[in-house]
Amino acid sequence: MAVAQNFQTQAPFAVLLDSDTGAVLYEKAADELMVPASMAKLATVLVAFQDINAGRLSPDSEIGISENAWRKGGAPSGGSAMFAIINSRIKLSDILQGIIVQSGNDAAIALAEAIAGDETTFARIMTERVRGLG
């Protein structure tokens, strides 16, 4: 069994996997409950990449920034945002960068709306896809 030699992290939770074998190389509090925070954004990105792979989306697809995405996740929210302009249309590749690099709530909400119509429906789709990972 492979082991992460001398690996340490200050993160309260961590799992390090061998990408070739799936073997767990390191874990820290891996089975404890935690607030998902940006894990939901990563799951949102996963759904987007799966949809790109399936041909339902393209990196050049335009994603609309609704008033809802702007108010709940954009500049007025005071949270992490990519600062997308209300009613603008942004290429999916830029939306993904806004989620991954800037942890943009506005980008994540806009993407959820583009894929599923609303956040609640998207949450169901996202949960289903993540459960499918195992």
Image (cartoon, rainbow, N blue to C red):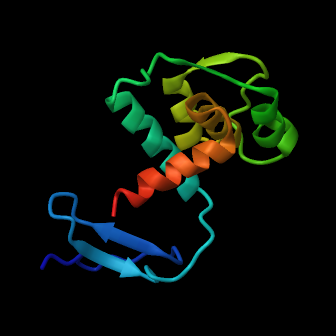
Which residue is depicted at the point 51% across and 83% down?
32
Q: x, y percentage for residue 70?
A: 79, 32
Where does the image place residue 67, in percent across and percent down from the top left?
82, 28
**Picture quarter containing residue 115?**
top right
Does residue 132 appear to the left or right of 118 in the view shown? left
Number of on-image labels: 0
Q: Nearer the viewer, residue 87 or 103?
A: 87
* x 44%, y 24%: residue: 57
User: Which of 117 and 61 lies nearest the eye of the viewer?
Assistant: 117
- The C terminus - image quarter: bottom left
Residue 7 percent coordinates (x, y):
32, 76
Q: Quadrant of residue 64?
A: top right
Q: Position of residue 1 (x, y in %)?
A: 12, 79
As drawn, is 131 to the left or to the right of 102? left
Q: Residue at x 77, y 18 (%)?
A: 87
Is residue 102 in sight in this rendering? Answer: yes
Res 103 seen here: no
The answer to whether residue 104 is above or below residue 30 is: above
Residue sitting at the far right: 76
